[in-house]
Amino acid sequence: MLHGRERTNHLLYRFEHITDSVARRRVFDRIMKTARLDHAHILKIERVGYDDTGRLCAITEYPGNQEGLVTLADLLEVRGGRLEFSEAIRLMGQLLEACMHASEQGIVHGPFSMDELLVDRHGCTLIELFGLEQALHNAYSVQDARAEQTRTVIGIGYQLATGMPFGEHSSSNEGGKPSKFTKKNARHWDNWFSYAMDPMGGFESSMQALQTMPTDSEHIARLIELKPQMPMQSMKRPARSNQNIAGAVFSRFRRSANRHQD
């Protein structure tokens, strides 16, 4: 949309009528909360209201270019299916930081897809309508939604870095090892992604994921403390005694992490 007086471009989101009053209130409240978020990687909501027919509407800035909106999926296709490893890790870190900021305000989105992530004219990645997924579908508890949003952000980072979909099959594929695409802290990146992929484990929050990303010695020390059970080069289960030790370490770390906001 073009603002009549200011001649500036905006996006208008017009939602279908929500007949359930509880769901309608939940979605409206979530959008109002999202409008108060102020983060470099969350698309800013400028106005919220209802149109003449009673349909909920939200207005944001227009982050596209002369060709239209550009999603992260579009960018990945233009780049041939994979970004440089450092680019992918930086982008993933930005998204995790945005999730952590929103969680500190009590807002959780749930699973992400690349089509919900926009790339503006300056190459900045923006999360579109943060929290709406959880508000619309209400399919997860807050704890599960937080874990799923962290898992999917890391999954997106994995695909950007390796060109392969995120999943268990990738962890056993030699070509999908992140260490193949970087020399810096290569083995630690394999372990970090392996821990994130573990269906029985994984990071519970974006803060936990950020605190263990092997970008420096302090983060690597935290990652080593987690002792990932399923290194990417092997899918074998550890011995029972090792499982007990690892379980105790996981429990201590999670209790410590849960004292803080995400």
Image (spheres, rainbow, N blue to C red):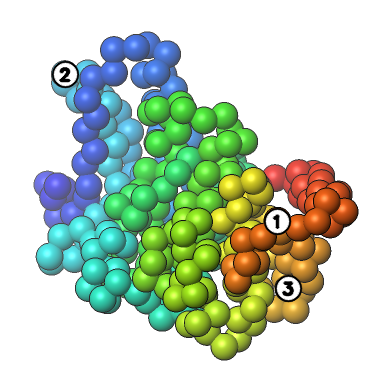
What's the residue type where badge 1 is placed? Arg
Q: Nearer the viewer, mark 2 or mark 3?
A: 3
Between 256 and 9, the one nearer to me in the picture: 256
Q: For label 2, count other residues whose C-alpha is less than 10 Å away and answer few (under 14), some (14-19) or many (20+).
A: few
Residue at 56% over, 56% down: 197
Look at label 3 and name its amino acid: Ile
User: Which numbered circle lies on residue 237?
Assistant: 1
* Residue 95 visible in the current orientation: no
> Alpha carbon of mark 2 to alpha carbon of mark 3: how far?
55 Å
Q: Which residue is mark 3?
A: 220
Of tags 1 and 3, the one toward the viewer is 1
Please report the residue visible at 24 percent of the width from the left and 64 percent of the height from the top: 74
Element at label 3: helix
Q: CA distance from mark 1 to mark 2?
A: 58 Å
Q: Is residue 14 left or right of residue 37?
A: left
Q: Please give the label number shown on residue 53.
A: 2
Residue furthest out toward the bottom: 183
Q: Element type at marker 2?
A: loop
Q: Position of residue 169 (x, y in %)?
A: 46, 59
Of labels 1 and 3, earlier in sequence is 3
Which numbered disc flags the more N-terminal residue, 2 or 3?
A: 2
